[in-house]
Image (spheres, helix red, strand yellow):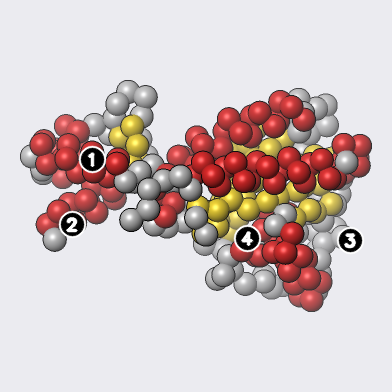
Amino acid sequence: MQSVQRAIDLLMYVGECGRAVGVTEVALRLGLPKTTAHRLLKTLTYRHLLEHAEDGRYRPGLGMLLLSPPALGASALTRAADPLLSALAAALGETFFLVVRRGDQVIVVHKVEGSGFLRASPNVGSAVPVHATAAGRVFLAFSTDLGLPAPLTAYTRRTPQTAARLQRLVDQTRHERWAVSVDEWHEGLAAIAAPVFCGERLVAAVAVACSSARLRQLGERQLIQATQNLSKALSRAISGVDKP
């Protein structure tokens, strides 16, 4: 029981630091022998709850996603997603981004800007309305404890404004495993999103945002396929962690 308590204290400390920590710091802060701190860090790294930073210190790992919403694992999730988002943004010239759920909100935690002249997407750190965005509908479709919001704020004339219509869109997202929104949050803004799973658990959504005119120019099917491929690749990357 003492080892379990120490491991929990260590995970909480590393998570609260918001930066990579070394063996000596952990031992001093938690009042542990250095050999004990090193053994715990090594074990938690083996289980992917922690991972090595570039300088050899320790930071939260992707295994954190198995324990909670990606609050502690968000930085690791972002690191895993960045090269995938960057490759598609460079190939298609559009902006790709990553969103996670925090409570009843859906938050943008990372994005890679495209090279196109006309670009439109939410800022990192901003919340997006779950009923009026493709990413939001992904969370409504695959989160068992996230209910339909009320009231349904009408941002544009195309925003879903009845629970029945929104439920149909959510059911469609669950069936097709992708969502599209056009002019629903902002006039002229289109987005396509797909779910990211760790095992069977939804941990994030990936999405591409562009102007509505650009969506028509590129073709919706091409962007749907690109977003689905992105979500599958990221799901494979983070589901490769060892499970107890």
Amino acid type, residue under disc 3 in the picture: Arg
Q: Which residue is mark 3?
A: 157
Look at mark 4 in the image and give the residue it sits on: 139
Residue at left offset 38%, top offset 48%? 242
Residue under the point 81% across and 66% down: 160
**Which sits earlier in the primary sequence, circle 1 or circle 2?**
2
Q: How far is mark 4 from mark 1, CA to CA? A: 33 Å
Q: Is residue 22 left or right of residue 241?
A: left
Q: CA distance from mark 3 to mark 4?
A: 23 Å
Q: Secondary structure at mark 2?
A: helix
Mark 1 vs mark 2: give the one in front. 1
Q: Tell me which numbered mark, 2 or 3, is placed earlier along the sequence.
A: 2
Between discs 4 and 1, the one toward the N terminus: 1
Amino acid carrying mark 4 in the image: Phe
Q: Residue at x 67, y 58 (%)?
A: 138
Name the quarter where the N terminus is drawn: bottom left
Q: Secondary structure at mark 4?
A: helix
- Nearest to N terminus: mark 4 or mark 2: 2
**96 left or right of 103?**
right
Q: Residues within 10 Å of mark 2 (few under 14, many from 20)?
A: few
| Helix, strand or loop status at disc 3 | loop
- Residue tagged 1: 41
Q: Which mark is residue 217?
A: none
Q: Earlier in the sequence, mark 3 or mark 4?
A: 4
Amino acid type, mark 1: Leu
